[in-house]
Image: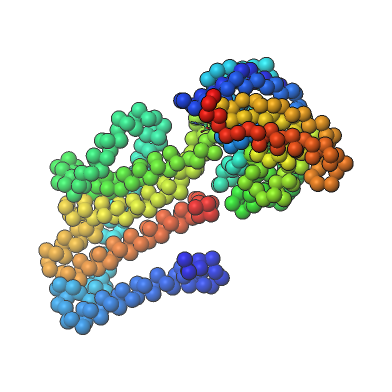
Amino acid sequence: MTDNTAGTPLSRAWANAALPALGAIIVIGLWWGLTAALDVDPFYVPSPPDVVQSFLRTPEFLLTETWTTLQRVLIGFGIAVVLGLVIAVVLAASRTVERMTMPMLAALNAVPKVALAPLLLVWMGFGDSPKIVMVVLVSFFPIIVSTMAGLSSTPSDLRELARSLSASWWQTFVKVRLKWALPQVFVGLKVATPLAIIGAVIGEVVNPDHGLGSVIVGSGASSDTPQAFAALVLLAIVGVVLFYLMAAIERIAVPWARAIS
Amino acid sequence: MISIDGVSRSFGPVQALKDIRLEVADGEFLTLIGRSGCGKSTLLRLIGGLDRPTGGRVLVDGEEVRKPRRDVAVNFQKPALLPWRSVLENVMLPVEIFKWDRAKSREHAQYLLETTGLTGFAKRLPHELSGGMQQRVALCRTLIQRPKVMLMDEPFSALDALTREELSLELQRIHMETGTTIVFVTHSIQEAVLLADRVAVLSARPGRVKQVVDIKIPRPRSFGHNAHLEEVAKASAELHQLLLSDHMPDVAA
Ligand SMILES: Nc1ncnc2c1ncn2[C@@H]1O[C@H](COP(=O)(O)OP(=O)(O)OP(=O)(O)O)[C@@H](O)[C@H]1O
Ligand SMILES: [Mg+2]
């Protein structure tokens, strides 16, 4: 690697903030340039100013819908994290339970979640719950898998240490295995974050009421492509913010992980 | 303190140890030396209760060893520090696991860090320390247990020569101060002669005790210039000879 991430504070700030911004500007510039150069009808692909205008026409509406989606994402993700961690811990604690349930979990994960959306509608009707359930379904599996991988990756020297100190199963689990697994858990959480957003949007597209997914469906129906794009951009922003938030939490929770990997 | 009573250990068809008989007296420093694969680590794990013999038995303090004991501490080649814990927290790990009084032990921990030259590093994380310092932390973590027996499996072998000598002298000081019984595995004749009251030379496959050599050099001993160069040279030569004459696995047997 030629990039030096451990440079002076100024060059680090530059690398952390300015470079991503520059990347975004280039992409938006290309988008703008192409739509202008090829003279694309905004009905097919709107240019950046079209999208901004569309947003400025109904900012309150769009932000409210964003908030609705964000709430569903956060609640669903929260449930997925708790569920995923608990299931992973139970599976890691008992080989028997793991062997009994792992194939079923994998099968459940292999089911295309979109196919479940109409069923959720039948079971739960309209409103928040089917969307939140969709978020949970889409995002909990990577959390289970990565947590289990982390829990079973304790190095042999640390396991021997715990054993030679006659640590109980619980002490070993809490003081060694779980801590050691945390960096891996965060890998799963970072994979699951964008999946949670995708889950919410699937729920809203299949079963529209509120939220950005419903806005996209509505814009399609009224041929308002710029509004659909505005909703997509808002989703992308939510995605980026949540991802970096997760990375920041990771840095605070496991500052030692970068140093040893 | 330790009696190894006709101990054998096989791994499937591989007989790692065969009929080992050794007595280690209270406060004695015994060094195990032998070629790679002759079963030194296996023997140490058997004494520590981390593994069970397939024949014979090991007694520590008159009791048969069936599982790890809290008064027997183990040091491995790797320092095995928890990377998220500071130096002090790593040293305190046994105290937490044994549910001892933390406030009292903290003073002891601080004292141990001071005497091993780690003052000022208590709050650092392991990855901020050199390999030698990490091994010192592991040593402090062992000492806070106030063990009756210390089992050490090539604890200094991953370090550079000078750090190694420093730590060996450190260990000699600890042994002289605490009078703990120590079983120490090494490949280094020099280390064995510096540290041991007796050196048990193991032969390979199956691992047996080939000979036990007494080292009767007064302590404290030191590397290089000392008053007992002749004895050191003699003991080293004897060990060298024993190790060399131990041909690789005897196929006929
Ligand atoms: N868990 C195990 N399973 C199978 N074989 C083993 C196991 N542990 C040790 N052995 C075998 O037992 C023999 C002795 O191994 P051991 O690790 O005790 O040797 P050692 O003297 O410590 O070697 P070194 O000096 O290289 O550390 C070797 O032949 C090894 O392959
Ligand atoms: Mg070994």
Left or right of B251? Residue B102 is right
**Which residue is painted at 55% across and 31% down in the image?**
B249
Q: Quadrant of ligand 1?
A: top right
User: Where residue A113 sits in the image (x, y, percent)?
Assistant: 21, 47
Residue nearer the viewer, B31 or B71: B31
Farthest residue to the bottom: give it.
A37
Residue A12: percent from left, percent from top? 51, 69
Image: B246 above or below A45: above
Write the residue at 60% across / 20% down: B19
The image quarter in which residue A9 lies:
bottom right
Answer left or right for B35 relative to A184: right
As drawn, is A101 to the left or to the right of B233? left
Residue A19, position as x, y percentages in the image: 42, 72
Res. B237 image quadrant? top right
* Residue at (20% x, 71% y) in the render: A226
Q: Quadrant of the N terminus of chain B?
A: top right
Relative to B49, is A220 above or below? below
Which is more toward the observer, A156 or A252? A156
Q: Is residue A46 left or right of residue A7?
A: left
